[in-house]
Amino acid sequence: MNDFFESAFAAYKKKNYNTALSIIDTISSKDSGSFGNSLQLKAQIYFELQKTDSFITTLKEIYQFNPNDKSNLLALIIWLNNDQKKNDAFNYLNILSKKIIEESDKDFFNKNVKQLSSFVNLSLDILKSQILDKNKQLEVNLNFKAFVNNIFNSKLALKNIHSEYQRPTYLHYPGLKESAWHNTESVKQLAPSDFQSLKEEIIDLFSSSQSRPYYQSDAPTKSSLESLRNNENWSSIILQNQKGVRYDSSEYPVLASYIKQLPLADCPPHAPEVMLSILKPGTHIPPHYGLSNFKLTLHLPIMVPKGELFIKVGDIKKTWKEGVPLLFDDSYIHEAINNSEQVRLVLIADIWHPSLSSSERILLQNSIEIIDNWHKYSFNHLFSYGLQYN
């Protein structure tokens, strides 16, 4: 044990706190054993002196010295929260959660589950506040307020869903017209004015472009689409997404004009996405659910061969007809099959749900990135350990 630390500890025992703190400041971090002990002693002194700011600062020093000390991290989060430094607490909670998950430390999780649950729910309140704050200049209606309240609680969100066929995997916006299939006349400009010219451009682009598997993943998943993972039988060519146009629009002016007229659901990083969907002969896309209900999926059939082909959304089957748009809510269970002998080619685009007002669309545009970030926070994964919403 370092002589300086022993002197500091002796001063502390005599309640000569200032002397103890002065001695501690002389201990070098190179003396790892004594330095760690001296930081703990320093924290204890500030705690007894009720100097909250200095105590919290020392807990941060302990974290910098020993980032693997989860108990200290939890103490730091508690004190930051008590001191109303909620954003700092939020950030350290994410660090702690990541350590718990990476180390699979269920013992620490189980020992502190009540405290962790409390902080995670407080963090969710911070995220909700961020959403409302970003939209404070806009009129927020009851549907949007309900949407924000239910964002991180799928059980509450499900109470607003009335169809057994609808289960969005990401987000549900309440108050919208519920229907697996939608009348294309409810959305203007879905039908192209010159389908033949559009078809010729799309076939040319399709013939000269490299498609990629529609469903891609580096590792096996539990998805119903696992059989098509990294499989070229169902592939796509991205034309436009949140990063912008992905093809040469000057070379395909009719296509560019058609896409421009569509009311695309512009809410990155969630949407929009415009693509060509290629379904090879003998391919079945198993039943699955889409991400959300506030955008609808447009299918504009480009190449539809003869044979058994259909798309089923909810409990209703339909067939594709070249040039005739179809519009459906992909948060309903849906599947597709091509049992013909040729490729089926469809242009797909994300379209705003027509029940959304223009202000609601802006509210969603302002909010999706914040919501998307939530899924990147490590504490989100603690729910798989049994964490509960309050």
Image (cartoon, rainbow, N blue to C red):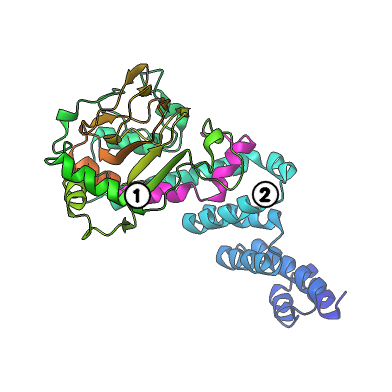
Magenta stretch bounds: 365-390
Q: Secondary structure at mark 2?
A: helix
Task: Tell me the quarter of the image containing the N terminus.
Answer: bottom right
Task: Classify residue 377 as left or right of residue 36.
Answer: left
* Separation (CA) of disc 1 from disc 2: 49 Å
Q: Main secondary structure of the magenta part?
A: helix
Question: Whole-percent x and y of residue 104?
Answer: 71, 46
Q: Residue at x 55, y 45 (%)?
A: 217
Q: Is residue 273 above or below residue 296?
A: below
Question: Whole-percent x and y of residue 218?
Answer: 58, 48
**According to the image, label 1 marks what residue?**
207
The number of numbered badges drawn on the structure is 2
Q: Residue at x 36, y 39 (%)?
A: 148
Q: Which mark is residue 100?
A: 2
- Which residue, as the protein is rendered here, is positioned at the far left? 193
Q: Tell me which numbered mark, 1 or 2, is placed earlier along the sequence.
A: 2
What's under tag 1, amino acid-wise?
Answer: Ser
Crowd tier of the residue under label 2, counting other residues whose Cα lies within 10 Å: few below 14, some 14–19, many 20 or above:
many
Is residue 322 inside the magenta stretch? no
Q: Residue at x 38, y 26 (%)?
A: 332
* Observer-nearest of 92 and 20: 92
Task: Classify residue 272 as left or right of residue 53.
Answer: left
Residue 137 appears in the rendering: yes
